[in-house]
Image: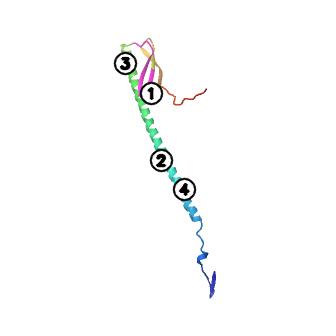
């Protein structure tokens, strides 16, 4: 309702003519809450992934250290064999397979065979072998 007095316009509001606040306020609040939840979820996934990768890296370091420890032990055994063969204390006549433990379920297997009338040898195998039996977890029935 407009009331004009001496050249000025005055706007009067009645109680029945009130306007509701725009819906945009509620939508923007919901958008901020949704974005906050998205960022929190992304942060939780990133943290979980980083912790998992850190654990895997530590496991990999432990496996490599165990493997190289077994390799060092194998090198020491071959060095001792070299000393025995050079001094003439022993003669290598047949192929031998040496086993060096890496972990509970793996070992390093080194295979050597004689060369030059038993006073020297050749390394024919240097490999990691699983020592545990493989067991199938799932059984599939093909024919009934």
Residue 85, image x, y percentages = 39, 15
Q: Which residue is mark 2?
A: 47
Q: Residue at x 47, y 42 (%)?
A: 52
Instruction: Check disc 1 and report its element: helix, strand or loop.
Output: strand
Q: Which residues are magenta?
A: 91-110
Q: Residue at x 44, y 27 (%)?
A: 106
102 lies left or right of 26: left
Which badge, 1 or 3, is on the more N-terminal residue?
A: 3
Which badge, 4 or 2, is on the more N-terminal residue?
A: 4
Q: Which residue is mark 4?
A: 35
Instruction: Check disc 3 and report its element: helix, strand or loop.
Output: helix
Badge 3 density bin: few <14, some 14–19, many ≥20, Cα 10 Å:
few
Q: Which residue is mark 1?
A: 106
Name the quadrant of the N terminus. bottom right
Badge 2 density bin: few <14, some 14–19, many ≥20, Cα 10 Å:
few
Between marks 4 and 1 in the image, the one whose residue lies nearer the viewer: 4
Between marks 1 and 3 in the image, the one whose residue lies nearer the viewer: 1
Between marks 2 and 3 in the image, the one whose residue lies nearer the viewer: 2
Between marks 4 and 3 in the image, the one whose residue lies nearer the viewer: 4
């Amino acid at each position: 309702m407009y009331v004009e007095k001496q050249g000025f316009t005055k706007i009067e509001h009645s109680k029945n003519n009130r306007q509701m606040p725009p819906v945009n306020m509620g939508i923007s609040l919901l958008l901020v809450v949704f974005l906050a939840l998205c960022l929190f979820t992304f942060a939780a996934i990133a943290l979980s992934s980083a912790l998992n990768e850190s654990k895997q890296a530590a496991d990999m370091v432990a496996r490599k250290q165990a493997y190289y420890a077994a390799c060092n032990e194998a090198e020491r055994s071959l060095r001792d064999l070299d000393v025995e063969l050079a001094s003439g204390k022993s003669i290598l006549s047949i192929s031998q397979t040496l086993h060096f433990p890496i972990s509970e379920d793996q070992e390093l297997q080194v295979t050597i065979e004689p060369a030059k009338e038993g006073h020297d040898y050749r390394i024919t195998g240097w490999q990691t072998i699983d020592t545990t039996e493989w067991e199938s977890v799932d059984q599939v029935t093909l024919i009934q």
